[in-house]
Amino acid sequence: MNTLIQQCHDYLKNCDFSYAFCGGYALELFLNKQIRTQHSDVDISIFDKDRKSVVNFLLKRGWGIFQATKINPDFKGGLVKQIKSADDESVLNVHCLWAIKSDCTTFKTSQQANSDIFNFEIINKHQHDFDYIEIIFDSISSGYFVCDKNMRIKRALNKAIMHVDEIPYLSPELILFFKSPPAYLESSYQREKCQSDFYATVPFLPIESREWLARACETAFPDGHEWLEKLRNERMS
C-alpha cells in the first residue's frame, strides 16, 4: 500500500462525509501494483452534497484551501485564491479545490499584498509528503455516479466505487474515462501519464468494465477516439 494513500485514508476515515481516491493512485489500488514512478498529487473524489463538509473539516485542522484561478502553460506555477470559509461562493461552484499545508514540500505560495490571491510555484513534481490534496467534486443522482453535465454517461454507485482493505477508490473505468478527453491527450504535460495509465490498466479490466468504457467514449466522442481500437480489440480477446 502506498504510504501517502494510507496516511490520507487514516486522516479521513473518521470524517462525516464520503470520499474515494481517484487519479493514478486509484488505478494502482485496482491493479495492486505501482504503474508510475511518480505521482504529482493525491486526488480524492467528494460528492457535491459534501462540499462544505470537506472544506470545514480541513480548515479546522489548519489546511489552507485554494481555488486555482490561473495555471501557467508550463504547469509550473500560477495564481490561486484562498478560501477562508466553507460559505465562500466558490466552494459551491468549482470543480476542484486544493488543500495545502503551510509547510508543503510540493507547493510554494506567496500572498499578494492586501489580497486573497497567492502566487504559487510547483517545487516538486512528485509529492513526497502528506501535505497536499486535490479535492475533486463529483455528482450523484438516483444511485448513479454522473460523469457528464448532460447526464448521458452514468455508472451505478456500487460499480463506481470499489474498495481494497476498506480504502475507497473510483473504479478504473471511471478514472480512464476522466483521462480520455482529447485536451488531456493532446497536452504535453498530461499525455504521457494518461497513455501509460490506459495501456497499463485496460488488459486487467473486467469485460463489463471495458464495455462500459468503450460505450462512454463512443457517447462522449462521436467523431471517434484513439483508445477505441484498443478497447474493441480487448472486447474480442
Image (cartoon, rainbow, N blue to C red):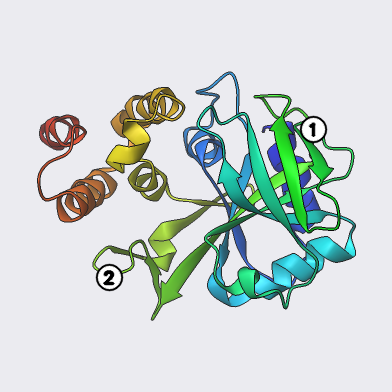
Depicted 26 relative to depicted 50: above or below: above
> Which residue is more in the foreground, 105 or 82?
82
First in sequence: mark 2 vs mark 1: 1
* Picture quadrant of residue 103: top right
Q: Which residue is mark 1?
A: 129
**Disc 2, SS:** loop
Residue 83 numbered tag: none
* Picture quadrant of residue 49: bottom right
- Residue 23 location in percent, x, y? 51, 42
- Residue 237 location in percent, x, y? 14, 30
Depicted 188 relative to depicted 72: above or below: above
* Picture quadrant of residue 194: top left
Q: Which residue is mark 2?
A: 150
The 10 Å Cα crowd at callout 2, few under 14, some 14 to 19, many 20 or more, is: few
> In which quadrant of the rendered image does the N terminus lie?
top right
- Residue 223 location in percent, x, y? 9, 45
The three-letter amino acid code for the residue at tag 1 is: Asp
Between marks 2 and 1 in the image, the one whose residue lies nearer the viewer: 2
- Name the residue furthest front: 113
The 10 Å Cα crowd at callout 1, few under 14, some 14 to 19, many 20 or more, is: few
Q: Is residue 222 left or right of residue 194?
A: left
The three-letter amino acid code for the residue at tag 2 is: Asn
Q: Is residue 152 visible?
A: yes
- Name the residue furthest bottom: 142
Q: Is residue 237 visible?
A: no
For the residues labelled 2 and 1, the Cα–Cα distance comes to 38 Å
Residue at screen point 61% across, 61% down: 19
